Image (cartoon, helix red, strand yellow):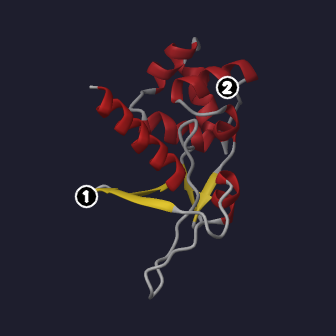
Amino acid sequence: MLRDNLIMLRNLNGFSQEEIAERIGISRQAYAKWESGKTVPDIEKCSLLAEAYGVTIDSLIKTNKLEGRVVPPAPEGKNIWGSVTLNERGQIVIPKAARDHFGLSEGHRLILMSADGEGFALIPAEWFEKRLALLGQIASEE
């Protein structure tokens, strides 16, 4: 678990073992032992690793799987909820964990936004409308 995350996060962030070891104040050999699973870091080093990689300690030590494949920990404050399948009517079901996390239930409105070639996002309509109103106020003050 931890060792897989350390390898993925180091590679995703473009660090060598030596660079990340230096960043947290240990030898490259000590870090290599963590990645091989021969030893594990103490809680203070886990905290430094989590900070260096921009993840929580919890996500650093847990293995997340998506459709049977291990995925890297999401950055702090970000989440990977799983995949959804578009049905024949163009509908998707938002995973229960995501609905619970955001307090979504039947009748909640969401705004669908996109960036060409990059995908799309669902934004709570209330949040979006508040930001639009704020922009309107700023524009009218100028």
**Where on the picture, by quarter, is residue 49?**
top right
Q: Residue furthest right?
A: 43
Q: Residue at x 65, y 70 (%)?
A: 106
Q: Residue at x 49, y 78 (%)?
A: 91
Query: Residue beneath label 1, please?
Result: 117
Q: Is residue 140 left or right of residue 56?
A: left
Badge 1 crowding class, 10 Å Cα cut-off, few under 14, some 14 to 19, many 20 or more, is few
Whether residue 119 can be seen here:
no
Find the distance from the CA under tag 2 to the CA under tag 1. 36 Å
Q: Nearer the viewer, residue 111 or 13?
A: 111
Where residue 117 appears, as percent x and y from the top left, is 25, 58
Q: Residue at x 44, y 20 (%)?
A: 19
Q: Residue furthest front?
A: 140
Where residue 1 appears, as percent x and y from the top left, is 67, 45
Q: Nearer the viewer, residue 34 or 100?
A: 100
Q: Nearer the viewer, residue 132 or 15?
A: 132
Badge 1 marks a residue whose secondary structure is loop
Where residue 113 appears, as percent x and y from the top left, is 37, 57
Q: Residue furthest top?
A: 25
Where residue 121 appears, as percent x and y from the top left, is 43, 56
Query: Residue beneath label 2, please?
Result: 46
Between disc 2 and disc 1, whose residue precedes?
A: 2
Q: Amino acid at mark 1?
A: Gly
Quarter of the C terminus within the rendering: top left
Nearer the observer: mark 2 or 1; the answer is: 1
Whether residue 109 can be seen here:
yes
**Where on the picture, by quarter, is residue 78?**
top right
Determine whether 55 is above or below 126 in the image: above
Q: Nearer the viewer, residue 28 or 101?
A: 101
Q: Amino acid at mark 2?
A: Cys
Q: Disc count in the image?
A: 2
